[in-house]
Amino acid sequence: MADEKKRLIRVRKNKNASFKRDGAGKKKQLSESWRRPRGLHNKQRRQKKAKGALPTPGYGSPAAVRGMHPSGFYEVRVFTVSELEGLNPEEHAVRIGGTVGNRKRAAIQDQALANGLKILNPKEIATTTEEGDAE
């Protein structure tokens, strides 16, 4: 089954389409993030070939790998050490929240590695020793 999931993740990546907002290249204040075209004469809404594709069901990812990280794990955001309980190392990968400080991050990383969990955003945390500060 692992080979099948890897294949499906590759399939999902290969049929990746970029849907851009209509007029994003014309006006500076328009971001490229997708917004549905609603104008009466809008060429993209009328699905003219050169004006860019609309998101349709055919662009969806396979159901078996929907919501998965490209590494093949389901991503779980963690803010405390207690949230690591009950996570399966074969299915879940941990992403530590951005607002977590270094002290708590170090504890979460140590516990996650002890449980065999993959950390998607590990950080090298330098611990200062009291001996080095005393000199």
Image (cartoon, rainbow, N blue to C red):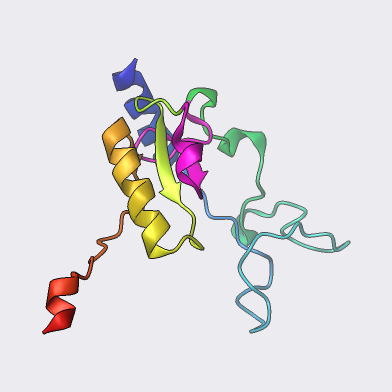
Q: Specify whether residue 85 is painted magenta.
A: yes
The residue that appears at 34% across and 39% down in the rendered structure is 112
Q: Specify whether residue 134 is painted magenta.
A: no
Numbered circles on residues, count:
0
The residue that appears at 63% across and 73% down in the rendered structure is 31
**Residue 120 seen in this snapshot:** no
Q: Quadrant of residue 115?
A: top left
Q: Would you say 40 lies left or right of 1 here?
A: right
Position of residue 18 measured from the top left corner of the image (x, y, whole percent): 53, 55
Position of residue 38 measured from the top left corner of the image (x, y, whole percent): 84, 59
**Residue 65 seen in this snapshot:** yes
The residue that appears at 37% across and 63% down in the rendered structure is 102
Q: Nearer the viewer, residue 132 or 33?
A: 132
Q: Quadrant of residue 73?
A: top left
The residue that appears at 42% across and 32% down in the rendered structure is 92
Does residue 105 lie above or below 60 as drawn? below
Quadrant of the drawing holding the C terminus: bottom left
Q: Nearer the viewer, residue 90 or 64?
A: 90
Q: Would you say 3 lies left or right of 50 here?
A: left
Q: Which residues are magenta?
A: 65-86
Q: Nearer the viewer, residue 67 or 78?
A: 78
Position of residue 76 measured from the top left corner of the image (x, y, whole percent): 49, 40
Position of residue 20 measured from the top left corner of the image (x, y, whole percent): 61, 62
